[in-house]
């Protein structure tokens, strides 16, 4: 029996580390809606994004929708991530438990960019007009336990990106599973994110005056026409992960996790992370490392901490922070507040 358990553990480890031996030509920059790959929530981000098998709070709507099946009370979350170049990402979501019917969640992700000057060939310093750009995802989530140890979940997302007077729309789907194995309390998870339609930019900014036959005299040389842009796929991502809790005395817990990611627009990589929870989750200290084994990666060390207080009469509150180191750009900072009631 022990040998069988060890064999299965080794097989899982080999699957997770397969990206080390499978580097191929990268397809970076070939997908739309890249904001969908920005990690949501300071807890998960502080653990290096190794969260697919841990996901047990409202941010599971991003990492693995099967995780929302764990919730037995209403939970709402708001997170803010400050990135480089005045870019920030906000996420707000709520999970509603429905007993044996499963749990339902609703979430909104918004990437916002500060207003920018409109420049032209004749006004390189700016025309005095400003324009904005943004990316948004509106998701409906569902998660349910199929057995006592196995849960599944799905997201349906409407995705929109806009810049000035042009925009692109798409529909995406996520599906995930979490299985608490009988082997030493190890959890195993798998998820597929952002499977859906292609996106194509359209809008007034693509309107031009066109001469369909410049070699012919007397024809209409000022026909209104639109540039036809290419269609781009969503950033499809396959993720598998394992994690395990280690109880330290009665009030403390250590969680270790490993995730392997296979995207459609880059080579594979591995994320690792850990969480040390003290005094029955009152204080948590977290750390991790992102994109191990990925060549030319810009990401790396992640750190964070959180505090949870459930002594209030009507609700529980958790406040979290994470730091993500970037190689060349400004480091990223995430903040989050979670309420349970």
Image: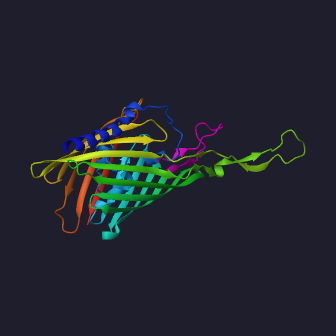
The answer to whether residue 327 is visible is no
Query: Which quadrant would residue 299 be assigned to in this image?
Result: top left
Name the colour scheme.
rainbow
Determine the residue positioned at 48% across, 54% down: 136
Query: Which quadrant would residue 338 be assigned to in this image?
Result: bottom left
Query: What secondary structure is the stretch in magenta mostly built from?
Result: loop
Q: Is residue 341 above or below residue 234?
A: below
Q: Is residue 86 magenta?
A: no
Q: Nearer the viewer, residue 17 or 1?
A: 1
Image coordinates of residue 204 in percent, x first then y, are: 65, 52
In the image, is 209 to the left or to the right of 100? right
Image coordinates of residue 164 in percent, x first then y, are: 58, 50
Q: Which residues lie in the magenta part?
A: 113-134
Image coordinates of residue 284 in percent, x first then y, are: 20, 48
Determine the residue positioned at 22% across, 48% down: 183
In the image, is 67 to the left or to the right of 228? left
| Placement of the C terminus among the 4 image quadrants | bottom left
Determine the residue positioned at 43% across, 31% down: 23
Q: Is residue 21 above or below residue 105?
A: above
Q: Nearer the viewer, residue 165 or 46?
A: 46
| Placement of the N terminus among the 4 image quadrants | top left
The answer to whether residue 183 is visible is yes
Q: Is residue 132 magenta?
A: yes
In the picture as drawn, the residue positioned furthest to the left comes out as 249
Image coordinates of residue 223 in percent, x first then y, are: 79, 50
Numbered disc total: 0
């Amino acid at each position: 029996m022990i040998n069988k358990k060890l064999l299965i553990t080794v097989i899982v480890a080999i699957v997770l580390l397969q990206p080390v031996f499978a580097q191929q030509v990268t397809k970076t920059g070939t997908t739309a809606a890249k904001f969908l790959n920005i990690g949501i929530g300071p807890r998960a981000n502080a653990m290096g994004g190794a969260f697919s098998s841990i996901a047990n709070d409202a941010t599971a709507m991003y990492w693995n929708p099967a995780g929302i099946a764990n919730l037995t009370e209403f939970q709402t979350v708001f997170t803010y991530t400050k990135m480089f170049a005045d870019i920030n990402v906000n996420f707000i979501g709520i999970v509603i438990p429905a007993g044996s019917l499963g749990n339902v969640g609703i979430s909104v992700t918004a990437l916002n960019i500060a207003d920018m000057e409109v420049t032209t060939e004749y006004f390189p310093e700016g025309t005095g007009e400003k324009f904005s750009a943004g990316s948004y995802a509106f998701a409906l989530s569902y998660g349910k336990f199929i057995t006592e140890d196995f849960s599944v979940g799905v997201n349906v997302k409407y995705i929109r990106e806009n810049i000035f007077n042009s925009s692109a729309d798409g529909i995406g789907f996520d599906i995930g599973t979490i299985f608490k194995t009988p082997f030493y309390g190890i959890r195993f998870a798998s998820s597929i994110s952002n499977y859906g339609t292609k996106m194509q930019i359209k809008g007034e900014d693509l309107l031009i005056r066109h001469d369909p036959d410049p070699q012919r005299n007397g024809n209409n040389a000022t026909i209104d026409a639109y540039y036809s842009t290419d269609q781009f796929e969503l950033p499809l991502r396959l993720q598998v992960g394992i994690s395990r809790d280690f109880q330290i005395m009665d009030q403390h817990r250590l969680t270790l996790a490993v995730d392997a990611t296979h995207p459609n627009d880059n080579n594979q990589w591995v994320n690792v992370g850990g969480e040390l929870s003290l005094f029955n989750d009152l204080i948590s200290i977290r750390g991790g490392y992102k994109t191990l084994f990925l060549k030319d990666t810009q990401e790396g060390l992640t750190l964070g901490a959180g505090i949870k207080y459930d002594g209030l009469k009507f609700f529980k509150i958790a406040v979290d922070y994470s730091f993500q180191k970037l190689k060349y750009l400004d480091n990223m900072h995430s903040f989050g507040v979670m309420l349970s009631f």
